[in-house]
Amino acid sequence: MSKYVRLFFNRKKKATETVAGAIEIVVCLQRERCYFHSGHSVTLSQWENGLVVNHPRAVVINEEIQKKVTEFEHILIAMQVNKDDMTIAQFKTYLSADGGNRRNFMAWLRERINNRPLRDGTRKGHLTTYKALERFGKFKTFDDVTLQHIYQFDLFIREEQTYTTKGKPIVRSQAAIHNYHKRFKAYVSEAFRLGLIKENPYERFQDKRGEKSDRPHLTEAQLKKLIRMREESTDTVMNKYLDFFLFQTFTGMAYSDAKSFDYEQHVVTIDGKDYIDGHRIKTGNEFVTPILPITRKILERNNYKMEITSNQKYNQFLKGIGLALGCSFPLTTHIARHTFACTVALGQGISKEVLQIMMGHTSIKTTEIYAKLPMQYVSQNIGDRMFRAWK
């Protein structure tokens, strides 16, 4: 038992062989004591060495008292983890009148999101989940973290009416809904480990991951048209955006990675060929991608510094380019990365294992999503043997 928590029997000296005295739990913090009734009272002959004896329900009573002692000890651990003031007053904020944990759950959740060592992109996603929980409004205290409320939250994020900045409705996919639960589950599990909640409701919640949507990408014909568009353009601003997009397309780099690209820092030479050796800002994973001849031209045109004004203006420009290319999907910075995987790499016979490293994917399963897509990857790599064998 913790030195901060112990049992005390018959504090008021009322117990006799026939009259029961209270069993209390004492919490000691900073030379201050507070007594909490355990819910049980016994006579003098029924108490010995900190345990209930000679009582028909002795085993059950001892288990119930020990359970409450353990809960108090868990609260003290949580206070230390949260760097709370180790005072009786602070301890009481974790308790309701009926002994439940009434501490502000959302305040704790926000604190954990801010303090955890997360990358900026990951933290942004966790804050998106936090805001959804805030709109849901039923997770006010730790006692509210129940299986029933998690099922209600699941229904809320499925049916919530959300819109883009231009007022278009957003329908969340199953994969998106799964991500909300995946992020929230991490904090619920942490609260359970710290003893802030009595059970982990996610152990009984049924959640499906869902299938990720296809990765739209430019075809080889569209990509060649885009290259011609850049070669024929004389507009300085347009050329900056086109070059940045083409740089992403022929390196597979995400927007944030391309924007932070430093030629002297990130380029290495192996067997006479140059490669970009970097780490993804989103995940920290290493990626290695070759500097192709066309990538070299793009770098030379821009004095080896890829710079644009803002992501917002960049995406606005790309929408117009997408219309000019006849795209059936909105052209965004992500399309450049998808095009690298599907058209530039897989379309030229690069294996998915090599592509995984080039893209900086944590799991080969992510890379396999791209490997399922391009028709030309199959047509260019099966050769004539299969056609000759099955006439």
Image: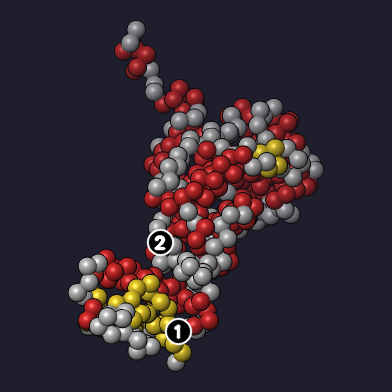
The answer to whether residue 373 is visible is: yes
Give the residue type at disc 2.
Lys
Q: Find residue 238 and report its horizontal and vertical position in percent.
A: 76, 43
Q: Find residue 368 and report its horizontal and vertical position in percent.
A: 43, 37
Residue 340 horizontal side relative to residue 242, left or right: left
Vertical placement of residue 12 versus 204, above or below = below
Residue 183 horizontal side relative to residue 218, left or right: left
| Res 155 quadrant in image | top right
Identify the image quadrant of the C terminus. Answer: top left
Of 25 and 195, the residue lying toward us? 25
Judged from this view, the residue extending furthest toward the left is 54
Vertical placement of residue 227 versus 298, above or below = above
Q: Residue at x 75, y 36 (%)?
A: 320
The answer to whether residue 250 is visible is: no
Judged from this view, the residue extending furthest toward the right is 235
Q: Find residue 39 and report its horizontal and vertical position in percent.
A: 38, 72
Query: Which label lies toward us, 2 or 1?
Result: 1
Mark number, residue 225:
none
Q: Residue at x 70, y 34 (%)?
A: 322
Between the C-alphas of marks 2 and 1, the distance is 23 Å
Q: Residue at x 59, y 44 (%)?
A: 156
Element type where label 2 sits in the image: loop
Category of crowding for the residue at label 2, using alpha-carbon neighbours closer than 10 angstroms: few (below 14), some (14–19), many (at least 20)? some
Give the residue type at disc 1.
Cys
Mark 1 sits on what residue? 34
- Marks 2 & 1, CB-CB < 8 Å contact: no
Mark number, residue 198:
2
